Image (spheres, grey):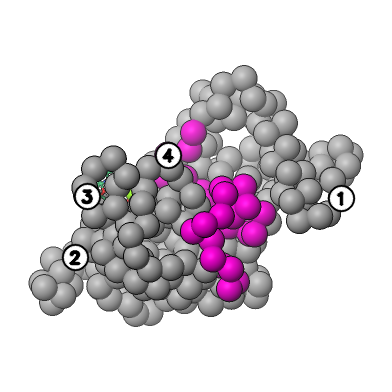
């Protein structure tokens, strides 16, 4: 599904190397978790994959289902099936949540050469999905994320994901700022989307999210590289011992 090889990334404006040779392969249908100390480059990795400005790839490659994504425009990456749930969801004043989602869904359909979703069908689908995430009709009418609580913003990210039905879902610290109930709700939303043709990259600081979203593979990222890969037990090890031992091992 996703194959990242020797990815090196620096900031465009500064001479600062952030990713220093990331290798990562995510198979179709699998859930991979990335954990790691603050500042290790986890968000940068998700931004570079999804096409945010401000970064320069200096070496390496990233392909989605065999296609080079690093040269694609943002909207083409999305149409190809990539989705990022932001660590800090963006507020978009003046743009209704529902209008935003309908435009996004239809833009993607158009890019794939598919027919638009009818207004009636869209309404039916969004109401169903919003309900399961406990997002009420009023929240769908408000401008995107404006005045939403932290938890509402994160649930709204999952609603976007559910509506767009991406192939490769990247979740950047979706659990941060969520209380226990909201975390369960978000996890259920994610688990409902799991299938053999869809993959997830779940970036998190905490093992507790991985109690709900059970990963197949866990990676530890530090200082711009993946320093260790293992099974779910690796997340437990980190929860108990922190990152210091792993980083010393790597050094
Ligand atoms: P993580 O998500 O693992 O906490 P980030 O990818 O956010 O890490 O950041 C990695 C490093 O890159 C940090 O040292 C951060 O300060 C730096 N960094 C990322 N983006 C920028 C930026 N636009 N300007 C300056 N420093 C940045
Ligand atoms: Mg961070
Ligand atoms: Mg981050």
User: In the rendered image, which residue does mark 1 sit on?
Assistant: 115
Tell which circle, 4 or 3, labels the residue nearer the N-terminal end.
Answer: 3
Identified at 68% across, 51% down, the residue is: 164
Mark 3, residues whose alpha carbon is within 10 Å: few (<14), some, or many (≥20)? few
In-front residue for pair 40/159: 40
Query: Given this view, does label 4 or label 3 mark the residue nearer the observer?
Result: 3
> Does dot 2 land on a helix, a strand or a loop?
loop
Identified at 54% across, 66% down, the residue is: 68
Question: From the image, which quarter does the C terminus lie in?
Answer: bottom left
> Does dot 4 land on a helix, a strand or a loop?
loop
Disc 3 CB within 8 Å of nearest ligand 1 atom: yes
In-front residue for pair 139/96: 96
State yes or no: discs 4 and 1 in contact (Cβ < 8 Å): no
Q: Give above or below for 35 relative to 136.
A: below
Q: Which mark is residue 243?
A: 2
Residue 41 sits inside the magenta stretch: no
Question: From the image, which quarter does the N terminus lie in?
Answer: bottom right
Distance CA(mark 4)–CA(mark 3): 23 Å
Extent of the magenta region:
64-90
In-front residue for pair 87/152: 87
Tell which circle, 2 or 1, labels the residue nearer the N-terminal end.
Answer: 1
User: Is residue 230 shown left or right of residue 80?
Assistant: left
Residue 62: x percent and y percent? 47, 67
User: In the rendered image, which residue does mark 3 sit on?
Assistant: 16
Distance CA(mark 2)–CA(mark 3): 23 Å
Query: Given this view, does label 2 or label 1 mark the residue nearer the observer?
Result: 1
Tell which circle, 4 or 1, labels the residue nearer the N-terminal end.
Answer: 4
Q: Give above or below for 166 relative to 230.
A: above
Identified at 86% across, 37% down, the residue is: 119
Tell which circle, 2 or 4, labels the residue nearer the N-terminal end.
Answer: 4
């Amino acid at each position: 599904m996703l194959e990242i090889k020797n990815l090196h990334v620096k900031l465009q404006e500064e001479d600062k190397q952030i990713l220093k040779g990331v290798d990562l392969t995510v198979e179709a249908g699998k859930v991979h978790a990335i954990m790691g100390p603050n500042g290790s480059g986890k968000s940068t990795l998700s931004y570079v994959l999804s096409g945010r400005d401000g970064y320069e790839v200096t070496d390496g490659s990233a392909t989605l289902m065999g296609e080079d994504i690093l040269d694609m425009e943002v909207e083409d990456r999305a149409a190809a099936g990539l989705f990022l749930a932001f660590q800090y969801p963006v507020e978009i004043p003046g743009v209704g949540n529902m209008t935003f989602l309908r435009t996004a869904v239809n833009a993607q359909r158009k890019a794939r050469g598919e027919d638009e979703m009818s207004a009636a069908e869209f309404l039916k689908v969004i109401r169903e999905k919003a309900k399961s995430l406990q997002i009420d009709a009023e929240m769908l009418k408000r401008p995107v994320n404006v005045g939403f609580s932290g938890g509402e913003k994160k649930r709204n990210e999952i609603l976007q994901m559910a509506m767009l039905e991406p192939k490769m879902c990247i979740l950047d610290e979706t659990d941060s700022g969520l209380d226990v109930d909201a975390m369960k709700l978000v996890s259920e939303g994610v688990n409902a989307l799991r299938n053999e043709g869809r993959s997830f990259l779940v970036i998190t600081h905490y093992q507790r999210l991985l109690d709900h979203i059970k990963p197949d593979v866990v990676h530890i990222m530090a200082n711009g590289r993946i320093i260790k890969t293992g099974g779910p037990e690796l997340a437990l090890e980190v929860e108990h011992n922190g990152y210091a031992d792993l980083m010393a091992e790597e050094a």
